[in-house]
Amino acid sequence: MADDNQVSRRMFLKTGLVGGVLLAAGAGALVVAPEGKVSTDIPGDLAAVEPSNWRALVAMIEAVIPDGDYDIPSLALAFDQRLSHGYPGIRKDMNLGLALLENPVAGGLTRGGFKRFSTMNVAERQQALYRWRDSRIGLLGLAYIGMRKLVLGSLYGDLDVAKEVGYPGPPWLKDDPGPIEARKPLSPPFVVQANVDDSLVTDGDPALVTDGVTE
């Protein structure tokens, strides 16, 4: 048991030290990027992603999403907005992860090639991400999972896209509640979709709908 604990501690320290070096390498990515396959044009203001990481973000999204005619820059902005709602530490880690992904030196250590991520074709980028996913360095696997979840959440957060995979939409529609006022409801009445002659119950009382039948 003592030997197993000692090995586990050594592996933990090794992983932590290597991970720290890799993150430092990612943070030290070259400021001036060469011409690549991904556009550097940012179609709006960024709330969480560093502008220097925009190229890596767009390249990563192109590699993660399924085939389809999607507006990648808009999807990248949605990713940025979702990330902006996270804790500051999460935003910092995600930016470090994107910088690490793009860095060619770190690429030689973590994904098998000294090449900027954004200059690869889509198939090469997918293989690079799979190397992170399957890496024995836990930080890389966690970075892959976090990036992929945010990308897919941004994609299917669009109701029109979600309907393409069979999601019909929320069971009721709810407006923006606006500012909270003292001694008033936290939110306005909402609309309940009842499958009764394709009608809508709009009285704002969900008790009026029971198992799809209006009372």
Image: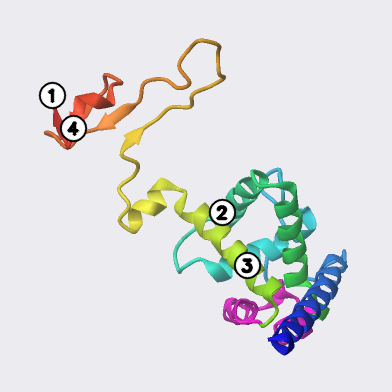
Q: Residues within 10 Å of mark 1 (few under 14, many from 20)?
A: few
Q: Residues within 10 Å of mark 2 (few under 14, many from 20)?
A: some
Position in image of residue 125 (x %, y %): 62, 77
Camera-side residue of 198 and 13: 13
Q: Secondary structure at mark 3?
A: helix
Q: Secondary structure at mark 2?
A: helix
Q: Amino acid at mark 4?
A: Thr
- Magenta stretch, residue numbers: 106-135
User: Residue 131 — which label?
Assistant: none
Kindly identify which residue carries mark 1. 215
Of the two numbered discs 1 and 2 on the same chain, state the one appearing first in sequence.
Answer: 2
* Separation of marks 4 and 3 at Cα, in angstroms: 45 Å
**Against 80, is 109 above or below?**
below
Camera-side residue of 148 and 2: 2
Of the two numbered discs 1 and 3 on the same chain, state the one appearing first in sequence.
Answer: 3
Q: Amino acid at mark 3?
A: Met
Q: Secondary structure at mark 1?
A: loop
